[in-house]
Amino acid sequence: AAAAAAAPARERGKLKLAMLDIYGFEVCQTNRLEQLLINYCNERLQALFNAQMFATEARDYEAEGLPQELFATMCQRRDLPALPLLEGGAEGQWGSPGLFALIDDEARCRFNDGDGAALRSRMDASLTGSTAYKAMRDASCFAVAHFAGDVSYDSKSFVASNSNAARPEILAFLVENTASDFLRAALGARLEDAAATASPPRPGRRLFGRTVIQAFRSELDTLIRALEAEGTQCHYVRCLKPNAELLPASFDEEAMLRQCRYSGLLETVHIRQYGFPHRQPMLKFVERYAPVMWPAECAARWGRPLPTNVRELPAAELHAWAECMAGLVQRRCDLSAGEIFV
């Protein structure tokens, strides 16, 4: 899937347009730390999308004049359970430092020489209370309930992979000796960021600078802050491939369903279901359904039959007809000033 973020921000009187290309969830035969971080990034972006969607829905309902009590509960932000599992924090009555903190501790302190089974034992002891964590029979494997579905991970190489972040002295050496202005600027920014977030060493601990998880989260936080900044407008495009062979007139149903699930498209449908997914202008609603469900009580109320041209009805009468017709629909309907929400 591809997500395009258009981010206009005033800088020296100009607008900026940025595009963020995200493939979606990675589910391989063996999923390691790299897949966990990619899927964590998708969780964060999906949480941002959910928050923006609920905010947009609330603004639309408010602009149409619907009573706030009808949409206040529907538009509340719904947290994804995988985020508190990975980042730490509270999920209901459960609280934990989080999976990332456990991996960082193992990588920086080497309590068990990077043993995957030992890390899995710590995870079982600390994370079992989370609804997003699922232990597996294999001694080093576990599963995370992402919003797109469960993904199993193998923790055997988590500690070693997490320790392979570029050390500050290596970055400093490259900055001083490279002939490329681009590399000097890029690595210099990384070096400044590492220095700003580095914690003072503690006696008796073998610190290796920032871990891969810390570096990844820092860069992701910067991206999320930019997307959440005031004046930024995000637009999303979902791209789906009908088949893996790139053949014309070929539709792979299983591949399409998998892409819909892993790109967050089904989650978008759930968001719309929380509110009023079907909206029509009041005039169009009356014109379409009047011939089959014109309420007799409304005709008796106005003392005349159905007009030949519904468009001739005054606004107050049109609203009354629509309200009577909506009452016959066995679903939740609400009328605004100009639309009907079903």
Image: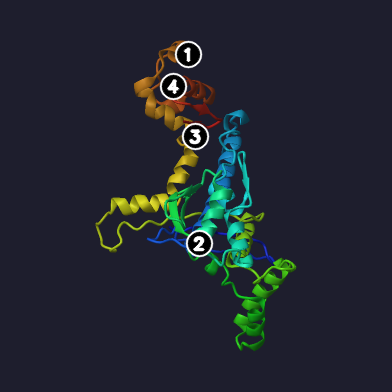
Kind of element beneath mark 3: loop
Q: Are marks 4 and 3 in contact (CB under 8 Å)?
A: no
Compared to residue 330, the image places residue 53 above or below, namely below
Amino acid, disc 4:
Met
- Color theme of the render: rainbow
Where residue 116 is drawn, which disc sits there? 2
Compared to residue 117, the image places residue 312 above or below, namely above
The N terminus sits in image quarter: bottom left
**Which one is in front in this view, the residue at disc 4 or the one at disc 3?**
3
Q: Residues within 10 Å of mark 1 (few under 14, many from 20)?
A: few
Q: Residues within 10 Å of mark 2 (few under 14, many from 20)?
A: many
Q: Earlier in the sequence, mark 2 or mark 4?
A: 2
Q: Are marks 2 and 3 in contact (CB under 8 Å)?
A: no
Amino acid, disc 2:
Gly
Whether residue 161 is visible to the viewer of this picture, yes or no, is yes
Judged from this view, the residue extending furthest toward the left is 249
Q: CA distance from mark 4 to mark 1?
A: 14 Å
**Which one is in front in this view, the residue at disc 1 or the one at disc 2?**
2
Amino acid, disc 3:
Phe
- Image coords of residue 153 (percent x, y): 45, 57
Q: CA distance from mark 2 to mark 4?
A: 63 Å
Kind of element beneath mark 4: helix
- Image coords of residue 27 (percent x, y): 41, 58
Where residue 325 is drawn, which disc sits there? 4
Q: Is residue 150 left or right of residue 223?
A: left
Amino acid, disc 1:
Trp
Kind of element beneath mark 1: helix
Residue lying at 27% horizontally and 54% vertically, measured from the top left: 251
Q: Residues within 10 Å of mark 4 (few under 14, many from 20)?
A: some
The residue closer to the viewer here, 145 or 196, is: 145
The residue singled out by tag 3 in the image is 276
